[in-house]
Image (tube, grey):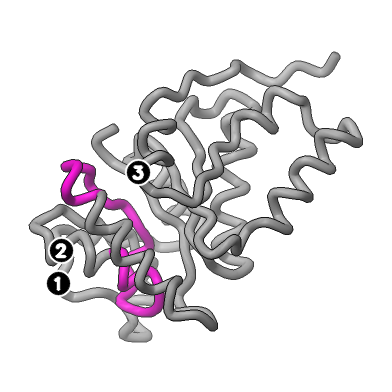
């Protein structure tokens, strides 16, 4: 993978470990020559991931709607900033540019972004890996719910296995590099 889109919070969360691990993940991307694609903000975990990339001579691409840029939350030291009109265009551009997707801790916006790309792989709109970095067990309840979806037959079993979940960022990247898409959803 040459580029990874990261979805994460525009706040730091309750525990310092979230921002520490977000910065370390950015450092890991830079050290592996993987370009960061993200929402372009300087705030919260988003800013920490970018900081980790940039302080290690990596390449960070922000994708920012004009509305948010006008609120002065955009990161001003990025390698590249792509301005778009809407949040939908932002996601579409991030999906286009990325070879894979990783979700770090965040709120409803983070979940919405990640689950859109996760749904898109199921219907064949892309075949890129979708990973969750489960920092400090943040996503344990969500992962349990994903298992419930499959157990209750609201998700095909192969898609449960398709979601790459790790608490170790090195292992997460290794598994994402080995990812093979299970194919398009059928309605059996």
Residues 25 and 181: in front is 25
Mark 1 or 3 closer to N-term?
A: 1
Please give the residue where the numbered disc 1 appears in the rendered image: 77
Mark 3 residue element: helix
Check disc 1: other Cα within 10 Å, few if <14, some if 14-19, many if 20+: few
How far apart marks 1 and 2 lie (CA) works out to: 8 Å
Q: Quadrant of the C terminus?
A: top right
Farthest-out residue, right: 152
Looking at the image, is mark 1 or mark 2 nearer the viewer?
2
Residue 160 placement, left or right of 100: right
Looking at the image, is mark 2 or mark 3 nearer the viewer?
3
In percent of width and height, residue 133 lies at 48, 52
Q: Which quadrant of the figure has residue 134? A: bottom right
Labels 1 and 2 touching (C-beta < 8 A): yes
Q: Residue at x 82, y 18 (%)?
A: 187
How far apart marks 1 and 3 lie (CA) works out to: 26 Å
Check disc 2: other Cα within 10 Å, few if <14, some if 14-19, many if 20+: some
Q: Which quadrant of the figure has residue 61? A: bottom left
Residue 106 placement, left or right of 99: right
Mark 1 residue element: loop
Residues 108 and 169: in front is 169
**Which label number is shown at residue 176?**
none
In percent of width and height, residue 98 lies at 35, 40
Residues 31 and 182: in front is 31
Q: Is residue 116 above or below residue 70?
A: above
From which residue to which does the magenta span run? 29-49
Please give the residue where the numbered disc 3 appears in the rendered image: 170
Q: Residue at x 42, y 33 (%)?
A: 176
Farthest-out residue, left: 57
Residue 156 placement, left or right of 43: right
Please give the residue where the numbered disc 2 appears in the rendered image: 54
């Amino acid at each position: 993978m040459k580029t990874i889109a990261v979805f994460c919070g525009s706040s730091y969360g309750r525990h310092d470990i979230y921002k520490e691990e977000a910065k370390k993940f950015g450092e890991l991307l830079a050290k592996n020559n993987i370009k960061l694609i993200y929402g372009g903000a300087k705030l919260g975990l988003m800013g920490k991931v970018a900081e980790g990339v940039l302080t290690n001579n990596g390449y960070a691409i922000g994708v920012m709607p004009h509305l948010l840029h006008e609120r002065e939350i955009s990161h001003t030291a990025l390698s590249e900033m792509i301005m778009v009109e809407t949040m939908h265009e932002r996601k579409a551009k991030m999906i286009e540019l990325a070879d894979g997707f990783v979700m770090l801790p965040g709120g409803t916006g983070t979940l919405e972004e990640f689950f859109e790309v996760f749904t898109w792989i199921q219907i064949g709109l892309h075949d890129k890996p979708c990973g969750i970095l489960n920092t400090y067990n943040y996503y344990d309840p969500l992962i349990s719910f994903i298992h419930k979806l499959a157990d209750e037959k609201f998700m095909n079993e192969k898609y449960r296995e398709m979601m790459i979940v790790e608490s170790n960022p090195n292992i997460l990247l290794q598994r994402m590099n080995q990812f093979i898409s299970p194919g398009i959803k059928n309605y059996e």
